[in-house]
């Protein structure tokens, strides 16, 4: 998956995590596509936010990264939203 | 005494002390990168866009890891140097390879090929140089196998197993990163392998450092020979990575086995509590080891707590994990390595004890602040969006920076002291001060072996 390489090259996990694994300064991006929508993610990548630099990704890189984040989103939910939490996590 | 062998042993020692000096320099650079990162995060307008967390984190990670990987390699080498069995070729190759790795990693980091991807990943050529460099440590251990196991069988096994695990973990992560394993389309499996590789490296260097710790205590404590402890360690190491993955989508059976294996660490925890009560430091190194005992309790205790799934699901991905990591990296790994360098150099300092106390108590304050903020984050994020709870917590995040000030001062003092000891040792080339003890014990053992059949015979 080319988007995984973009994630690594951009050093995104300096600040962001997937399933809680990674940096803690920014939000966990496991379900960012579901929660914010792809257009918001693309706009954030292009213009940056407070504490986040603007990334000069090409159109293709941005597309690949969105596809990668979508794939991660579809693979599970983090953090779990149920109470009480299941003993060994939530695989849904 | 054979002067040729003596000259070889001295060259060997020189190479290993150079390697230890290089590691000490990396510790200083790591502290500097960490300090700049904290300032950049707390006051973003302080630096221009050339110095950002995006570039500082890889630098901080690279120098920390070089310190924690090259340092033990050098210490094991110094412990192993003997007049009758020099490892000059190995020491020279290791020094050249680690220096090449460091130069390559700095160059690629400056070129934008970051090393901070997930702590232990660099471009393949650079990673392979590090793998080859670290693969020489088990060779050094095997070269001196009888000498190490004579002093402590447990230390010998810890050094050998640990030094084998580190390069294996690096290779596993390299294969994953460059898609050789074909996991890119499955984020769950990809994360599992990624964290298994990282935990293999961490488990490996921890074992090497504990092996060094046992060598440092010398003959002051009894030997731990129980074979079941090695089996316990093997099971734990094979499966302990799982508790990083309760939150990721993977088979429940893996999570359950991982939970069971991690709980076995309770046994180690209880043993360390007992050892801590018995410890009575008599010199600066033993004083440092007492703090290492405390931080081992902290690291294992928090590790066990974090391995309980319902706690893990709230605490994972928060500053609680950072507290656990800092306790292990600084309180256990770094203090052990610093203690080894100080002991081997034989140089004492009047301010060292105060610096150790400042580091340890400063680290405790730092970890408590991280844990409190982490728990708050873990609870708030279940029912609230990131944009909400981030605003609530933001005013308190500055506490992290202030709580790190005593720790930074103490650790920097120790790092400068360590570099000073290494520079002085390059002139005097001190070796392992237990060498003479080994010779005397060896002679005594041979004498016992000769005399015991007679005793049995006469008793009969």
Image: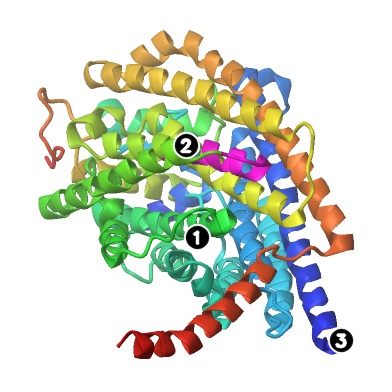
Query: Left or right: where does residue B73 sit relative to residue B395?
Result: right
Q: Earlier in the sequence, mark 3 or mark 1?
A: 3
The label nearer to you, 2 versus 3, is: 3
Q: Specify few, some or many for label 1: CA neighbours under 10 Å numbering under 14, 14-19, or 20 or more.
A: many
Q: Mark 3 lies on which chain?
A: B
Label 1: state its secondary structure: helix
* Residues under numbered marks 1 and 2 in contact, where contact means CB atoms less than 8 Å apart: no
Q: In which quarter of the image is residue A66?
A: top left
Q: Residue at x 42, y 36 (%)?
A: B277
Q: Which of marks 2 and 3 is nearer the N terminus?
A: 3
Please name whichever residue, B210 or B52, is drawn nearer the observer in this view of the structure.
B210
* Residues under numbered marks 2 and 3 in contact, where contact means CB atoms less than 8 Å apart: no
Q: Judge whether residue B218 can be spotted in this image.
A: yes
* Residues under numbered marks 3 and 1 in contact, where contact means CB atoms less than 8 Å apart: no
- In the image, which residues are magenta? B281-296
Query: Left or right: where does residue B111 sit relative to residue A21?
Result: right
> Label 3, on which residue?
B3
Q: Is residue B172 above or below residue B136?
A: above
Asked whether B286 falls inside the magenta stretch, the response is: yes
> Label 1, on which residue?
B211
Label 2: state its secondary structure: helix
> Label 2, on which residue?
B295
Secondary structure of the magenta portion, mostly? helix
Q: Distance between the residues labelled 2 and 3?
A: 44 Å
Q: Earlier in the sequence, mark 1 or mark 2?
A: 1
Residues at marks 3 and 1, common chain? yes
Q: Where's residue B39, x and y in %?
A: 66, 23
Q: Where's residue B45, x and y in %?
A: 68, 19
Q: Residue at x 79, y 63 (%)?
A: B430
Q: Residue at x 16, y 38 (%)?
A: A89
Q: Which chain carries label 2?
A: B
């Amino acid at each position: 998956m080319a988007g995984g390489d973009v994630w690594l090259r951009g050093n995104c996990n300096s600040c962001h995590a997937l399933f809680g694994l990674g940096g803690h300064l920014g939000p966990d991006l496991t379900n960012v596509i579901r929660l914010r929508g792809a257009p918001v993610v693309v706009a954030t990548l292009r213009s940056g936010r407070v504490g986040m630099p603007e990334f000069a990704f090409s159109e293709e890189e941005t597309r690949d990264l969105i596809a990668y984040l979508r794939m991660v989103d579809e693979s599970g939910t983090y953090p779990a939203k149920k109470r009480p939490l299941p003993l060994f996590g939530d695989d849904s | 005494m054979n002067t040729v062998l003596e000259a070889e042993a001295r060259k060997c020692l020189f190479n290993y002390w150079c390697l230890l000096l290089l590691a000490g320099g990396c510790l200083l650079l790591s502290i500097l990168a960490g300090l700049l990162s904290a300032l950049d995060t707390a006051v973003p307008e302080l630096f221009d866009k050339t110095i950002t967390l995006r570039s500082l984190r890889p630098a901080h990670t690279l120098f920390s890891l070089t310190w924690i990987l090259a340092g033990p390699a050098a210490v094991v080498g110094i412990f192993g140097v003997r007049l009758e069995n020099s490892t000059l070729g190995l020491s020279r190759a290791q020094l050249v390879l680690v220096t090449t790795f460091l130069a390559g990693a700095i160059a690629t980091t400056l070129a934008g090929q970051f090393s901070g991807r997930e702590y232990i990943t660099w471009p393949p050529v650079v990673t392979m140089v590090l793998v080859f460099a670290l693969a020489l440590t088990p060779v050094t251990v095997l070269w001196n196998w009888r000498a190490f196991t004579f002093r402590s069988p447990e230390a010998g096994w810890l050094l050998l197993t640990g030094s084998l695990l580190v390069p294996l973990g690096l290779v596993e992560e390299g294969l994953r990163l460059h898609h050789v394993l074909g996991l890119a389309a499955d984020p769950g499996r990809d994360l599992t392998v990624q964290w298994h590789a990282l935990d293999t490296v961490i488990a490996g260097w921890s074992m090497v450092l504990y092996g060094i710790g046992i060598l440092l205590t010398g003959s002051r404590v009894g030997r731990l020979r129980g074979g079941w402890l090695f089996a316990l360690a093997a099971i734990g190491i094979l499966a302990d990575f799982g508790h990083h993955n309760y939150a990721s989508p993977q088979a429940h059976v893996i999570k359950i086995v991982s939970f069971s294996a991690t709980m076995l660490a309770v046994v180690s925890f209880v043993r360390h509590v007992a050892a801590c009560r018995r410890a009575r430091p008599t010199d600066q190194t033993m004083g440092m080891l007492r703090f290492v005992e405390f931080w081992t309790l902290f690291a294992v205790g928090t590790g066990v707590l974090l391995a309980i799934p319902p706690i893990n699901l709230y605490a994972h991905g928060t500053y609680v994990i950072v507290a656990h990591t800092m306790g292990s990296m600084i309180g256990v790994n770094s203090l052990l390595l610093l203690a080894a360098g100080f002991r081997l150099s034989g140089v004492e300092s009047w301010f060292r004890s105060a610096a150790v106390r400042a580091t340890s108590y400063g680290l405790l304050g730092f970890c408590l602040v991280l844990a409190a903020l982490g728990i708050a984050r873990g609870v708030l994020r279940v029912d609230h969006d990131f944009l909400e709870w981030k605003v609530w917590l933001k005013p308190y995040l500055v506490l992290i920076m202030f709580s790190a000030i005593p720790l930074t001062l103490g650790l920097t003092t120790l790092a400068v002291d360590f570099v000073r000891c290494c520079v002085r040792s390059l002139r005097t080339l001190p070796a392992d001060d237990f060498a003479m003890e080994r010779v005397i014990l060896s002679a005594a053992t041979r004498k016992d072996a000769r005399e015991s059949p007679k005793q049995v015979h006469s008793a009969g």
